[in-house]
Image: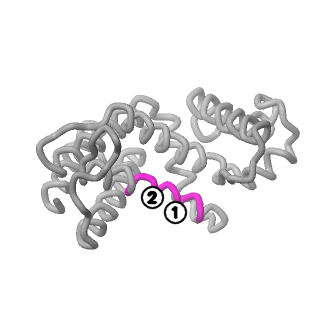
């Protein structure tokens, strides 16, 4: 988990470890992400890697969190446009799915870590869910160039957004398990958006 107390060199070290894990996952999925390989590739001691990321699951869920945060930054630079919140949310889900489906081995590794049941990873899993919900909420409310909300979000809206975030994750699990075809993911999410929003 990133900490505001990290020095610049610690932050750079952490970013290197995440970058190497991402590269390994892209090259060979879950099995390719070996902690010793990550440490070696990031030029850190294995103990250092474990201080930052106590398990492979923790590391890969942290990679997913970083990916969602990067998507959020891109969305800040180029916000989705649309006449209503539902269309903007659907567009955000489309961008997220395109990115994830473009790197299937990485996505499979991240989702496997996310649903591992490792309770030590729960705080980072919660951060992934919260970050995706925040991203969807921002799109739903609409933003102008200063990121000021165009519309307020009610508690009911917040719940609907959280449910969509959960449905998004569940749909990704279905896709990586092979029970949902990649082409069916976005239409399934569009249906969920139309029902909930």
Residue at the image position 31 percent from the left and 49 percent from the top: 148
In the image, residue 23 lies at what x, y percent? Answer: 62, 28
Mark 2 element type: helix
Residue at the image position 59 percent from the left and 64 percent from the top: 123
Residue at the image position 28 percent from the left and 53 percent from the top: 149
Quadrant housing residue 36: top right
Q: For label 1, count other residues whose C-alpha is less than 10 Å away and answer few (under 14), some (14-19) or many (20+).
A: few
Q: Are marks 1 and 2 in contact (CB under 8 Å)?
A: yes
Q: Is residue 51 magenta?
A: no
Mark 1 element type: helix
Q: Is residue 52 shown above or below 94? A: below
In the image, residue 141 lies at what x, y percent? Answer: 24, 54
Q: Is residue 63 shown above or below 137? A: above
Quadrant housing residue 92: top left
On the image, numbered disc 2 is attached to which residue? 129
On the image, numbered disc 1 is attached to which residue? 126
Using the image as rendered, state which of residue 114 and residue 181 is in the foreground. Answer: 114
Q: Which residues are magenta?
A: 123-133
Predominant SS along the magenta part: helix
Residue at the image position 42 percent from the left and 45 percent from the top: 176
What distance separates the C-alpha of mark 1 from that of mark 2?
5 Å
Using the image as rendered, state which of residue 24 and residue 196 is in the foreground. Answer: 196
In the image, residue 80 lies at what x, y percent? Answer: 26, 37
Q: Is residue 99 left or right of residue 26?
A: left
Using the image as rendered, state which of residue 109 and residue 124 is in the foreground. Answer: 124
- Quadrant location, the N terminus: bottom right
Say how the picture is coloured: one colour
Q: For label 2, count other residues whose C-alpha is less than 10 Å away and answer few (under 14), some (14-19) or many (20+).
A: some
Q: Is residue 27 left or right of residue 81?
A: right
Q: Residue furthest bottom?
A: 155
């Amino acid at each position: 988990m990133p900490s505001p107390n990290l020095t610049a060199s610690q932050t750079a070290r952490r970013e290197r470890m995440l970058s190497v894990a991402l590269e390994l996952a892209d090259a060979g999925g879950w099995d390719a992400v070996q902690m010793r390989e990550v440490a070696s590739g990031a030029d850190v001691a294995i103990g250092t890697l474990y201080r930052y990321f106590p398990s492979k699951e923790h590391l890969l869920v942290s990679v997913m969190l970083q990916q969602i945060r990067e998507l959020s930054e891109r969305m800040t630079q180029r916000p989705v446009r649309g006449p209503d919140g539902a269309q903007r949310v659907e567009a955000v889900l489309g961008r997220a799915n395109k990115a994830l489906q473009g790197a299937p081995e990485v996505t499979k590794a991240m989702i496997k870590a996310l649903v591992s049941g490792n309770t030590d990873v729960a705080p980072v899993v919660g951060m992934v869910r919260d970050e995706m919900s925040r991203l969807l909420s921002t799109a739903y409310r609409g933003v102008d160039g200063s990121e000021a909300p165009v519309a307020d979000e009610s508690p009911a809206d917040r719940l609907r957004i959280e449910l969509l975030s959960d449905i998004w994750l569940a749909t990704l699990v279905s896709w990586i398990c092979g029970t949902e075809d990649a082409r069916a993911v976005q239409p399934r999410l569009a249906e969920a958006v139309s029902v909930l929003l």
